[in-house]
Amino acid sequence: MIVSKGERLLIVMLEPAPYMVSLSSALKERWPGESSTLFVSARMTQNWDQSDGFRCLPRGMGAFYELWSVFHKTRPDMVLVAGWQHPVVIAAIILTKIYGGTIVSLSDTWQSNSKGIKYLLRKFVMSLIDQFAPAGSRQRDFLIRLGISKSKITVINLTVNVAGMKAFGEEMTTQRRDEFRSGHGLESDDVIVIWVGRFAPEKGLDTLLTAFDQLLAIRGGVKLLLVGEGDLSIDASEHIKPIGWKSGDDLYSAYASTDIFVGTSLMESWGLVVNEAMAFGLPVVVADCYGCLDDLVEHNVTGLVAKTGSADSFTDCLVKLIDDQQLREDLGENGKAKISGWTSQMMADRLVAAYSTVKERN
């Protein structure tokens, strides 16, 4: 690692999602010099828990002034940004070039329809980035299709606090599991399917509910636990249990008390809920549009892959798992083994390596 104590790190992320907070902490532990983190917003996609003491930029033009002030005072050597599209991120990229730093861009993008001025702007901004840190294989291949040299790409394996989740799951007792279930109207011997996300059309809730209705018509003893909130309203019933948005130990308890994870989004850049479910040893059923698919979900090995938007495909996968407990256990264990090395610390190491690569190249 070619990093000295005198070098400064600045992290500019969009919002304090748990995985970003974990990554920021891991980077600070591994960076020998000064480091700081700025978030563009505390609630870009949802209102995240603010107990971690992170720093958010003000709204409007104040964000650009404060960002410039940070650059002017600290003159960071490495700047890690989220993608290349948000105006504040673009400003951070340009300021990095002005102040002579190195820009590393973390991204989960693997599809784009940019045309005209947007295409030209993206091309210009991306030309300023020193090293790209794509989430995984699909994201890497997207960059290569755009003409980015392989030498400027460091795949980071986007992940969550796997170690913490794994430890929580292993400490979950049968009594605590049964207490969680009884508290949400779930029987101890039910097969519980868990879905986690925003209640929004693009998350494929219509597909999910249709698939589950079809499942209930042919199999009993199955219930659906919905973790999240949003614009769509879903009524509770005997078999469908919405429990609202959860985080921290409350979310961990939900994962650790259920049997099968299902991801039905109609488009998903990555899908960190898949990482989370696998960390708890759950067999996963995931739509084939998920950006994490090529890296994490091998059909019939670490999970099952369903056709995006097809309720029939999801129903077939769920029936297969419900009817075969051994398959559930095998897929869950294989997935848990697969994700076990995908830690925030590993991701931090790869990002520091990305910076070192630029220094060696220059």
Image (spheres, rainbow, N blue to C red):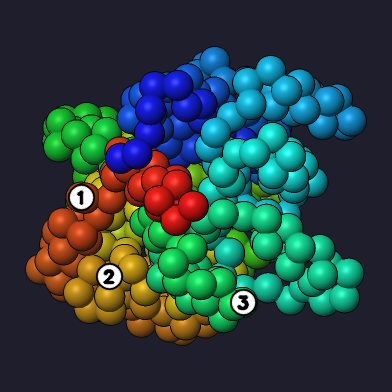
Residue at x 40% of width, y 51% of height = 360
Q: Secondary structure at mark 2?
A: loop
Residue 345 lies, with reference to residue 107, above or below; the image says: above
Spatial CA distance of label 3 from label 1 is 32 Å
Q: Looking at the image, which residue is at 36% across and 82% down?
A: 316
Kindly identify the amino acid type of the residue bearing the numbered disc 2.
Gly
Q: Residue 76, how many percent across, how many down?
A: 59, 29
Find the residue positioned furthest to the front. 362
Q: At label 1, which amino acid type do we have?
A: Ser
| Residue 150 picture quarter | bottom left
Q: Read off the residue under disc 2.
A: 303
Residue 204 placement (x, y as % from top left): 59, 67
Q: Are marks 2 and 3 in contact (CB under 8 Å)?
A: no
* Rendering quarter of residue 130: bottom right
Q: Is residue 118 left or right of residue 210?
A: right
Residue at position x 33%, y 30% in the image = 30
Which element is circle 1 on? loop
Q: Closer to the camera: disc 2 or disc 1? A: 1
Q: Is residue 327 left or right of residue 130?
A: left
Which mark sits nearer the N-terminus, 3 or 1?
Answer: 3
Other residues around mark 2 within 10 Å, as few (<14) / some (14–19) / many (≥20): many
Viewer-nearest residue: 196 or 129? 129
Would you say 13 lies left or right of 63 here? left
Looking at the rendered structure, the secondary structure element under dot 3 is loop
Q: Considering only vertical position in the picture, is 228 above or below 119?
A: above
Quarter of the image that includes the N terminus: top left
Q: Considering depth in this image, is 99 or 191 the residue closer to the camera?
A: 99
Dot 3 alpha-carbon crowd within 10 angstroms: few under 14, some 14 to 19, many 20 or more: few
Q: Which residue is mark 3?
A: 146
Q: Nearer the viewer, residue 331 or 24?
A: 24
For disc 1, the marked residue is 340
